[in-house]
Each structure stands twice: as C-alpha cells, then as structure tokens.
Amino acid sequence: MTEPAPVWCERTELLLGTETYEKLRHAHVLVVGLGGVGAYAAEMIARAGVERMTIVDADVVSPSNINRQLVALHSTVGQPKADVLAARLRDINPAIELTVIAEYIRDEATDRLLDHEPSYSFVVDAIDTLAPKVNLIKGCLDRGIPLVSSMGAGAKTDPTLIEIKDIGRSHHCPLAHMLRKRLHKLGIRSGFPVVFSPEAVRPGSMILCEEQNKKSNVGTISYMPAVFGCACASVAIRTLIGEMYPPIHRRLPSGSRLTPYPCTAAPEETSTAASGTSLSNQPPCNP
C-alpha cells in the first residue's frame, strides 16, 4: 500500500497525482556545487518531495556570497555550505535520506561518486570550474545517468533570456562555449540539457584574481543564480516524472553509448504572458 504523502507535500500530490508524486518521492538526486545555483536547485528538488538526495561541496560561506547564495547569511559565514544546506533540507523534510559530501569532486573522486549503487536517478551539475565540470558530465554520460548542467549566471541581469536546450544548441554563453570545446575533444557534441543565457556580458563586470580554483571574479545580481537553479530543478523534476521533452536518457547497460536526442519535432513552445519569455527545450538536430 502506498504511504500517504506528508501534509507539506499535499499540494505537490494534488498537482501531479499520487502515482507521479511517488516517482519523485522514491528518486535519488545528486547535486554537485552548492553555490548560487546549486543550493537553490537542491532546495526546490527537496521541496518537490524527493526523499533521497546527495549534496556535494567543499566550500565554506564567505561574506561575498551573501548577495546571491541561499546558504549565505551573516550568521553562516565560515560554515561549510554543504552543512548549512543540509540543515535547511532536513528542516524542510525531516524524513529525507541525505548524504552530505564536503569534498572537491575531481578525477578519481568523480568516478567514486558516480559509481554509487543503485545509480542516481538524476544529477544536477552546478560546478563553476571547467575541468571538474567536464569530468562530471562525461562520467554521467558514460554511465547513462540523466543530468542537467548550469552555465554561467554571472555578469547578466535579464532572467527572461534564460534558455533550456541541449548543449549542442547553446549559444552566446562563454562558459557553454568553453565547455563545448572541451567536450568536442572527448567526442561529445550533444546528449544533455543545459541552462544558459545568451545575454551579452555586462562590460566591466569581471576582474582577474588568484584564488584557489578561481582565476576571475564575476559580478552577479541576487536573483539570476536563483532563477538558474530553479530552471535546473525544473529539468530534474520534469525528467523524473517523465514529462521533460525530449526525454532524458535512462541508464544504459555497461559498455553502451549514448546517442543524441532524436531530431523530431518539439511541442510548440509556451510563452509566459506576464514576461513574454519562453524556457525552450528543443531537441538538437546537429549536422
């Protein structure tokens, strides 16, 4: 017999129906990177009713995070981001089965993380450093684990320009451009959705720096990472309930290769009347 939804999930169950809500409830979602984008994505996924999550980030809250990051308050400065977010998620859902990893994911650590059994239902890539981002994406694709990857939310101010498309159809985004170049060298040109914005980078919004894992600092407004995070959460949730178009790949048998999204006609995009924007997720038809 299906266990009744907790009271705080009744509105989600009312929207989706009991059978679809149960798909969310029993999923296991991995979120890597808990900064401006990742923490919002993780919280929206938890609030949707996902009862098993793994969250990963080795960073601590700094004062410069307060303008845009969910975990950043004056009272949390100096605390590990993963621990701060874990407390929030457990307060949202006391029954959540949560694994917290305070580690920078790179090289062999990526394989250890992704070789979890049973496999993750979905992965959210919110890493802001290129090399580990590429490793995580390739690792997911090699294992047939569905994912969404966030591109850069910095140096931009217009949320109505945000798009959701296959990596092969991303455009006018510096991070997406660098990511595509790295992935092309690995033979990957499509096969997973990204959240990005083609909005032009604001002049003077970036300065060079010499910090651990960072070579530059980019100006960021409060709401843009949050919107990116919500868009990532929407892809995760709609994929888990089978309503994302095109469907994300299921886990494949060992040794299998992913193929690109089928080049079929996408459903007509729906514009948001209030803003005149559309979050597009059309499939790629790469030559």
Image (tube, rainbow, N blue to C red):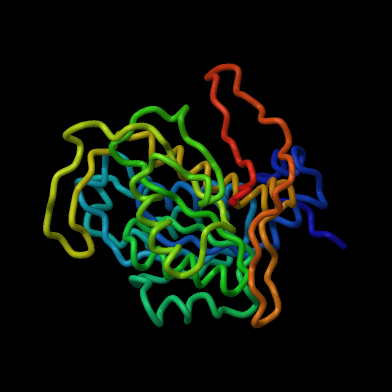
Q: From this viewpoint, which residue is outermost toward the front?
A: 287
Residue nearer the viewer, 193 or 168: 168
Give above or below for 187 relative to 218: below
Relative placement, left or right, of 114 versus 267 is left
Give above or below for 46 relative to 119: above
Total numbered labels placed on residues in the image = 0
Query: Residue shown at 52%/59% (left/top)?
Result: 189
Query: Residue shown at 74%/40% (left/top)?
Result: 265
Give above or below for 38 relative to 227: below
Relative placement, left or right, of 174 versus 135 is left
Relative placement, left or right, of 20 versus 216 is right
Give above or below for 115 relative to 196: below
Q: Quadrant of residue 103?
A: bottom left
Q: Quadrant of residue 257?
A: bottom right
Q: From this viewpoint, which residue is outermost toward the top?
A: 274
Query: Residue shown at 47%/27% (left/top)?
Result: 160
Q: From this viewpoint, which residue is outermost toward the right?
A: 1
Image coordinates for residue 94, horizontal then vertical, percent: 57, 58
Image coordinates for residue 264, horizontal then vertical, percent: 74, 45
Query: Residue shown at 18%/51% (left/top)?
Result: 216
Quadrant in which the N terminus is drawn: bottom right
Image coordinates for residue 91, horizontal then vertical, percent: 50, 53
Residue nearer the viewer, 11 or 199: 199
Q: Quadrant of residue 28?
A: bottom right
